[in-house]
Amino acid sequence: MRVRESRGKEVLVPGLLLLALAVIGLVALLEKGPLHILTAPGAYPGNNGPLGTSILYQKLRENYTVIPVTSWSYIRQTLNPCNLSVVAIIVSPETSYTDEDLESINYLKGSCRKFSLLIADEGVESNRVLESIGSKVRISGAILQPYTLVANLSTPWGWSGRVLLDKASRVNVVQPSGDVMPIGFVEILATSVEVAYYEKVNGVEVVVVGDGSMFLNQVLDSNIGEYPLSFIRSTVSHLCGELGNCVVLMEASKYMGFDPVEVLRSGDKRVLGLLNMIDLVLSLIARLVHPSTWLPPLLNIVNHSIRSLIELNPYFKGLIIVVGAIIVMLVVPRERRVKDSMLEDVAEIDWYGFGEFRRHLVSHGAKLTKQDFITLYDMVNTILRSTTGSTLEDPQLPSVLEAIGVSRGEAEAFRGFMVKYYRRATGKTLWPPLVMWGRITRKAIMMCEKILEPLGASITRPSKLELIAERGLRSSGGS
Amino acid sequence: MEVVRATRRLLALLLVGGLLISLDVVGVARTGALGMAIVISILALRVYTSLAQTALATCRVRGSYKGFIEGGDVDVEYEVCNDSIIPIAFVELSLSYPQHLRLSRGSRGGLIAIPPRGCIEYRVSFKGRVGLHRIGPLRAVLRDPLGLYRGVELNLGHVIEVRVRPRVSERLVRALLQASRATGVSRSRRPGEGVEFYSVRDYRQGDELRRVYWKALARGKLAVKEFESETSAYILFILALDETTLYGPYLETPLEHASRILATVADYASRRGDIIALLIMGPGVLEGTRFRRGRRGYVEVLNLLTSIDYEKHVLRTGPEAKAMMGDGARIVKYIKSMCPRERINVIILTPASEKTINVIKNLSPLRSMGFSLNTFILIPQLYGLTKLSPFEIAVYRLKVYNDIKRAYDKARELRSNGIRTVIVTPWETPSRIMATLNPIR
């Protein structure tokens, strides 16, 4: 497709349209309101602050396919069919699990080839997940004193060692059975307190640790992070099994988000200290660029300025009209005005050898002249010569025509009429002095038609007339 | 270049809007809101027209056609689909097609609106006439609902090349085949497969029983009848073209008449097993098919007839066209190059025009190679007789008689050059041509 009448460079999208689209876009952005950029300071895999789990995410990615779960229902759709071994890691969630989330987790549990759960939480939000899959283990949520404790961990898959816990919770068993076994203790006042359990419930392996701190960046990035990381790797490796095709799901949907600008505005130094500086700067830039920040104040300033100018001096109204007129005069001539005419349709035509004459003949009739009479005489003479061997000049013609069925009177009248007016037309005689050649030729046509009919020719019908005439001309040896 | 232009209505409306605003600003009347509404409406329509024009320019357009037989309906259809979310209103459409075609159904233009994510179909029908015709594209001009803006003219879709083949008279072909069997027109003077009795000879092993000559058997001699083998002739059809071949009413021009005759005669010849080829020569064309036996030859003849392009081949003018028709030696050379042997029957159909007759006169050297040249002259002036009243026919005949006599002179010229020449009128049928041709086969 191309633009017709193009001259020079073709422009399919004019500047005015682009400007209009830009204005529409600005208004639409304005209507949507300011940007709400949220950043989660908790144990969120996208948080690379001290309380985030981005290092854990990176370390696991070295060996497994790791998917941060921003929506459990979306994961349920994505991993369908789920012919995989799936390990879900939940670290210190901050918000509650909904029924839909739990349903999705249970769906994965039932549909995947192997489903395992690693929960590290000092709060009680994870208990709903444990409850929904039928686990007998619960996290008490009561933080043990002192905050810093050393836990002895010893797992059935052979990993044992000591890790440092920070604000850990006791892990309880609601209904003791053979499927549940403690794998981690802390010593508080010579009393052993369980802080980690391993459980196998309906084929689902569950590892629960009463503290999420050893999964955090601040631990894994420090010189004491070696043991926790070794424990996590060993645990994930065990939970994945030897089936291959293991996918690790890291909880990323149950953390509270903060708008960095709002935090900055509130001046809450505690939260501010948890935020990532890059996130903060980017969100500030985005907020400043957004038209909701600058467009309403700008329009307000323009409006106030014009109003104050008008109030200052009444003649300013006239100035506005003059400026408006100048703008119109500048803008309107740029618009190339065209005459709005209809598209020209195709004019269908027929070509004819005597096209103009034929059209005139059909619409207005034709004026017959002396020359036409001479032509008629010539044509009929040729046909008579071709068919009867006689011509109009031949006195025997009436007898010849009588022999082929034309009445003698008619034949004589025909010959007399044609010869008389032919002599007049060719100037051999001046009698009759006044001749209306149109009427005479018409009459001659009618007479000729009657005479030619018995000869198998016709001048008023499409017939072999021209062939007969050609034969006549050929036999006479000339045209 | 702007894709949308303002019409003259815009300035008037803009001035009214400006006047209303001015009246309000100076405090004469409270018409500012109305003025602003007018100005904003104008701007909104400008934006809308530009968007709609862009949407129109990016519309998906698909063109197709059905029908390829002369005299039958050729249905042309364009589907215009607007994939954007912008309604396109209003678009003036006009279909481009050659002036020599005539619509039998549908309108050659119209005003349409294309809904967003919707399609419209535009259909027209033509009475098919022989040759190659280029139909389309659709020309389109967009206007806003108030007619303040007009988009530049766009071409929607591509040009559709419609090929229409001549109608063959099956009745005539059968009649010709019947007549040729009855008269045994293709005698070879050799025994073989055929219908004509040739001789009686002694029976040989393997002869069909139905060929046994019972009269001889009655005399105690086992003999069989032999039939004369039919010949197959080499026939070259030549169709000479110039602008006069388009004279006459729609579907009744010398070109169409000649094409019909050629198609019918080619069909007949192909069924007889003749080896045929067609050469078309005109102001813009010198093109021939290869000599082929039977149906292959017939199909190639039909294909060449359907490729006649009125604009390029027939109506072309200028020095090149003149040279093409004036270069007799080149045409003779071309004919020699396409003929696999000497002694070929050549059937020429030509209008009685100075240009084409002169070309045919130049073909007389072919006679020295044993070519049999047979020319059929069509008189274009006579094609104007159809669709006239009886009296108009008589008057028309008187006016064109001298021209027709000149055509007779042309025929005489050709005859004097040793080329068999027959005048053909619009009422001739191929049977007359075959009557001339059969004795030479």
Image (cartoon, rainbow, N blue to C red):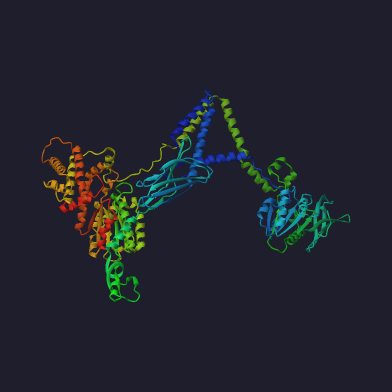
Q: Nearer the viewer, residue A231 or B6?
A: B6
Q: Nearer the viewer, residue B325 or A228?
A: B325
Residue B61 at what x, y percent from top left? Answer: 47, 48
Residue A132 at what x, y percent from top left? Answer: 76, 52
Q: Residue furthest top?
A: B28
Looking at the image, residue B342 sits to the left or right of residue A33; the answer is: left
Looking at the image, residue B327 sits to the left or right of residue B122; the answer is: left
Q: Nearer the viewer, residue A266 or A41?
A: A41
Looking at the image, residue A262 sits to the left or right of residue B289; the answer is: right
Residue B142 at what x, y percent from top left? Answer: 46, 40
Q: Nearer the viewer, residue B432 or A435?
A: B432
Residue depicted at 33% across the width and 49% down the height? B251
Residue B199 at what x, y percent from top left? Answer: 27, 71
Quarter-of-image position of residue B108: top left
The quadrant of the rendering that contains the N terminus of chain B is top left
The quadrant of the rendering that contains the C terminus of chain B is bottom left
Q: Residue furthest front?
A: B218
Residue A254 in sight from this viewpoint? no
